[in-house]
Amino acid sequence: MKRRHLIYAEMDSPIGDLTIVSSPVGICSIEFGSYSQVKMSILRMSQRMMFLEEPKSSPDELFEVIRQLNEYFDRKRKYFQVPLDLVGTPFQKKVWHQLQQIPYGETKSYKEVASLLHSPKAVRAVGGANNKNPVPIIVPCHRVVGSNGALVGYGGGIGIKEYLLQLEGCENYLISI
């Protein structure tokens, strides 16, 4: 029988506490903060996904994604191999798929992502979808920068975006001051 609730696990990372959430299909959210800090956001997501029960802590079931995230932070992993359950509009899903095509250690501008989607005028829509990315780090929205290379917008904050880009060895962006 399929689970009737989301599961979550917390992990320490170099960028602070992360809460990883999974549906029966796959990872559906990574939140910046401990579960107690992001609980309301996770409960809203659970309701939108029509789960009847409150999310349950299950670190053992999420061991693999935690292992892969730790390897990423230790510079031992460039690609993630975990099932995802990305809930969004068809356009958002196209953007998130395109983000996963940006190689480790490289960046693309919002304009470049829009062009790759054959929607060169959809720069703002790409930014909006990037902002709604439910699985940061694994779906690397941190690799998207302004047309001039400036670090703009990131759910975890510009400092975390800069940290992740430096971790990956990116050099083609403007450092924030």
Image (cartoon, helix red, strand yellow):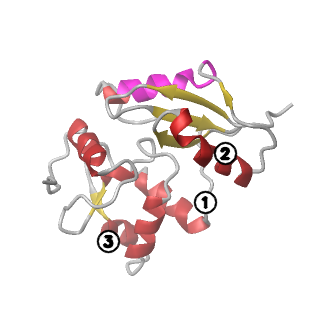
Disc 3 to disc 2, C-alpha distance: 34 Å
Q: Position of residue 33 (x, y in %)?
A: 46, 37
Type of amino acid at the residue the image marks with label 2: Leu
Residue at position x 41%, y 54% in the image: 99
Q: Are marks 3 and 2 in contact (CB under 8 Å)?
A: no
Majority secondary structure of magenta residues = helix
In magenta segment, residue 20: no
Which residue in the protein does label 2 denote? Answer: 43
Type of amino acid at the residue the image marks with label 3: Lys
Query: If the image is split into quadrants, where does the N terminus sit?
Result: top right
Q: Could one spot residue 67 in this view of the protein? A: yes
Q: Are marks 1 and 2 in contact (CB under 8 Å)?
A: no
Indicate which disc, 1 or 2, sits on the residue closer to the N terminus. Answer: 2
Residue 109 versus residue 72 in the image, above or below? below
* Secondary element type, mark 2: helix
* Secondary element type, mark 1: loop
Indicate which label's residue lies in the foreground, 3 or 1.
1
Type of amino acid at the residue the image marks with label 1: Gly
The answer to whether 18 appears left or right of 54 in the picture is left
Region rendered in magenta: 60-71
Which residue in the protein does label 1 denote? Answer: 88
